[in-house]
Image (cartoon, grey):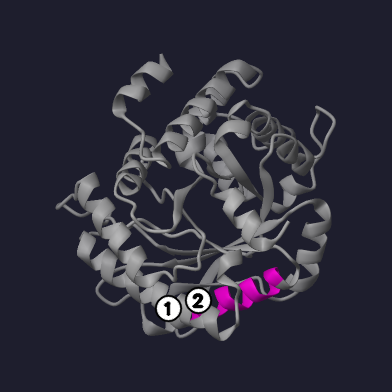
Amino acid sequence: MKLNEIAKKMCAKGKGILAADESTGTIAKRFKSINVENLEKNRLNFRQTLFNSSAMKEYIGGVILYDETIRQKTTLGPTIPELISKHGAIPGIKVDKGAKPLAGSIEETITEGLDGLRERLKEYYDLGARFTKWRAVYKINDNFPSSQSIKSNAHALARYASLVQETNMVPIIEPEVLMDGSHDINKCYQVTTDVLNECYNELEIHKINLKGTVLKPNMIIHGSECKDKSSSVEIAKKTLDCLKKNVPSDVPGIAFLSGGQSEIESSKNLNEINKINDSNFLITFSYGRGLQASALKEFGKKQDNIENIQKAFNHRAKMNGLSSKGEWSEDFEKVSAA
């Protein structure tokens, strides 16, 4: 399959991407919140339950995995990538090594993981991955993000993307402007514009085939501590405007991160964006908590109650599938969850 075909399949109308790439440390926090021990068998049990649900065929185009997960064999027989592929979704892999303090501006971060990446990518391809993810993180306050942070992270994203396409996989470009802070929606718009411009400048320098990429950005939204909350309609208008002005039209798909929004908020905002989407972009979701939070609660109640865990996951996947077509309504939340 060509890179452009993979990218389009990941973001196909009515489908999106399940971000199940939590590190062992991150999922430890999630499991602690539901009083589940952070053991490999529990991590496998939860994830394979999601990956074997009916929603996978209908609403999920791709799944981002963590290093441990892509190597696991399910208790059902196939490997994790085989199980995902069996349901018609594409297996992918998070390849960055996390955000580390940026020398010269240690309150900011630079994402690491380029050393040895070419060799790791070959191994991941052999394990079944056909796309990858690399996340850069930018914080907003009076002093940040600095020009150093914006330029350094864009350069790393481009070098990553170049190596990924060399291995015949699709790179997800994830420049996340964090919601943390008291900034308003206009500040988020301005910073996201600067970040996207620098990212695509570097991607052009590195001769990246944009038709074989997917962008995973933040929505244009007020900070989590901002007193002046923006409506979903305003979030949608500013987000779409920012994307149309700053993302080249060759990019086939844009899959938003949920970034601290609740399950309902992330579905509602995505829906509003798609209701007014007059661009060529396939606009969808790449959610972690936005897809898994309810299922995780059910897993905490009873780990072997596969029916209830999958019911919770199926519901959220369906809601976001509708949002990716601009067809979601709050009424569907009540009906489907009943």
The residue identified by callout 1 is 150
The residue identified by callout 2 is 153
Quarter of the image for the N terminus: give it: bottom right
Q: Which residues are magenta?
A: 152-165
Q: Alpha-carbon neighbours of circle 1 within 10 Å: few (<14), some, or many (≥20)?
A: many
Q: Position of residue 171 (x, y in %)?
A: 62, 64
Question: Left of 238 or right of it: where is 112?
Answer: right
- Residue type for callout 1: Ile
Residue 37 shown in magenta? no
Q: Nearer the viewer, residue 182 or 308?
A: 308
**Local SS, label 1:** helix
Asked which quadrant contains residue 121, the reply is: bottom right
Q: Nearer the viewer, residue 26 or 96?
A: 96
Question: Left of 318 or right of it: where is 158?
Answer: right
Q: Main secondary structure of the magenta part?
A: helix
Q: Are marks 1 and 2 in contact (CB under 8 Å)?
A: yes
